[in-house]
Amino acid sequence: MTASSALPGRLTGETLRQLRGRWSTAQLRALPATVDVETAGSVLGMGLWKARALIRDGRFPTPVIRHGQRYVVPTRPLLMMLGVEPDTPSA
């Protein structure tokens, strides 16, 4: 999978580093309803450690949901922050 392809399945750390801050609108719209912290950080142009530090300090720029021992980030607020309209399902 190349960094410019659609986003089927889980992305590797290397792919996320390549995409960091360079996500296309189509790639953003292809994200699932929630993403992990590393993906959310990549979308916002930051690495995993910075994203974790902002979450720990309560300063991550979008809502974060604690799910057991891990955190997930809802995709819709990420898209709204970036000014990307989410795909609307066709009827």
Image: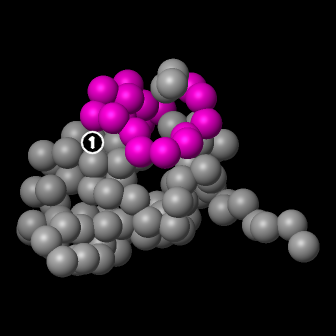
Q: Is residue 11 magenta?
A: yes
Residue 18 on the magenta segment: yes
Most frequent secondary structure within the magenta stretch: loop
Q: Nearer the viewer, residue 7 or 77?
A: 7
> Residue most toward the top?
2
Chain part drawn in magenta? 4-22
Residue tagged by mark 1?
Answer: 46
Q: Amino acid at mark 1?
A: Met
Q: Is residue 56 left or right of residue 17?
A: left
Q: Is residue 10 visible?
A: yes
48 left or right of 23 in image: left
Chosen colour scheme: one colour
Q: Quadrant of residue 34?
A: bottom left
SS class, disc 1: loop
Residue 51 at x, y percent in the picture: 20, 53
**Residue ranking furthest to the right:** 91
